Image (spheres, rainbow, N blue to C red):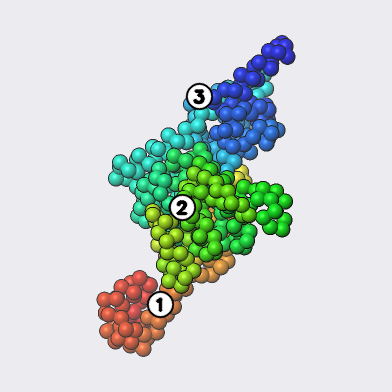
Amino acid sequence: MKNTTDLYDYYSILENMPDGMFIVDSNRVITFWNKAAEKILGYPAEEMIGKTCDYFKSPTCLAARLLNENEKCPLFVYESIFRKRCMIKAKDGSIKYVIKHANVLKNDHGEIIGGVENIVDITEQVEAERLSHFRNQSQDITSLHNIVGANDKMQELYEMIALAKDTTASVIIYGESGTGKEMVAQAIHYLGERRSSPFIPVHCAALAESILESELFGHVKGAFTGAISDRKGRFEEAQGGTIFLDEIGDLPLSIQVKLLRFLQEKEITRVGDNKHIKIDARIISATHKNLNKLIADGQFREDLFYRLNVIPIMVPSLRIRKSDISLLVDHFLKKFSQEAEKAILKCAPKAIDILSGYAWPGNVRELENAIHYAFITCNGDTIEPDNLPEQIVKYVLFDEKKAYTVDDIKEKEQIESALEMAGGKMIKAAKILGYSRVTLWKKVKQFNIDRKSF
């Protein structure tokens, strides 16, 4: 048996290894977690010790366990794992790609008492491969850094992310609420040269003007009532990295002046102080508002707009990329299955028809919430129409062959009424409706109307 000094030296070596290393017992409970593992995944040792390895939700491990009897860990089935490429969810919510090597630990009787796992971060290489594939091949990609979509508009978005990721220029992201503007900002940051430095998000519309100024630029002790000590602002926290200003159109004019100064001088001043602090941080902003209208109305500075609008990026609404709904549904079902360890990975075709017929005013965020609701209410292995939220099913009416929106149904009823008034004569019905004859023929075919019945 090793003496105390030997054990100390052994753990000291593991602790200071350049690769991530952790040890689990026979119940997959983590008993050791080194500094490199913390650096790769963001979880400190004190958070991980005593947790099972399910805690960091690796979809690769979960899927492998589901294939084994009693969901047994593959390591304890095969006793070793060599060069396994895995996806692991990091503490900040991002997905990390690692190469894993693992071996079981046995006692003197040859009984398995645990396992030791070694992980090497290959996220940068994987993302580089994806970008290289996108740039150099004519084939489309279906996802990039947790953003999902294969539509032509999404391909344009991926290209803009690739162009913006390694520049120092300001980026502004335009898009409706719920389209995923913050995810685009994260992709630009984490795929770029600043990936190892902080990504600091600030929601400009969520805070009052007096609080927002201190939140962004910090304050010194005594600057205002309640300022009992000096405090760093978000710009200082973003040193070397990226500050993401969401809903920049809601930024008060008084703070727009200080933001403009930062963009011009690369320095900030804390509230209540005269000292200038140099900051190296890249600004990515986002808005769902029309900034040109705000400028015309005197609510947004034109000079600030030009400083922010160096690289404009448009995020398409879900309404104009409904072909991506199936991809997004699959993505969310995998995500919820990993989080809940409940295997629902399919959505019935009629449920997809209903989802495709809906208008999605809340965009991808609303779709994610709808699928989460369906996932919770589903007792089988497939999402059916009756699992979907009632407001979506009510909006979309369907027959055995096709799904129709409420507007479709209204138009179909108008056409049938016109055909009835015209005695089934297409030319007369077209005049009543104000359609051309060709348009009416197309509509009759689209709605499967039997004109002979009139």
Could you classify mark 3 by the number of other residues whose Cα lies within 10 Å: few (under 14), some (14-19), or many (20 or more)? Answer: few
Mark 1 surroundings within 10 Å by alpha-carbon count, few (fewer than 14), some (14 through 19), many (20 or more): some
Horizontal and vertical percent position of residue 170? 43, 51
Q: CA distance from mark 2 to mark 1?
A: 55 Å
Where is residue 359 drawn, in percent x and y? 47, 66
Question: In this orientation, does residue 428 appear?
Answer: yes
Q: Nearer the viewer, residue 423 or 435?
A: 435
Residue that appears at 41% across and 67% down:
292
Tell which tag, 2 or 1, sits nearer the viewer: 2
**Measured Cα–Cα span from mark 3 to mark 1:** 61 Å
Residue at horizontal 26 percent and vertical 76 percent from the top: 438
Label 2: how many Cα within 10 Å (few below 14, some 14–19, many 20+): some
Indicate the quadrant containing the C terminus: top left, top right, bottom left or bottom right.
Answer: bottom left
Kind of residue sitting beneath label 2: Leu
Q: Position of residue 72 (x, y in %)?
A: 61, 32
The residue located at (44%, 39%) in the rendering is: 193
Q: Is residue 380 visible?
A: no
Question: In percent of the image, x 73 and y 14: which residue is there?
Answer: 4
| Residue 263, label in figure | 2
N-terminal label among 3 and 2: 3
Residue holding disc 1: 412
SS for callout 3? strand
Comparing 31 with 190, the one in front is: 190
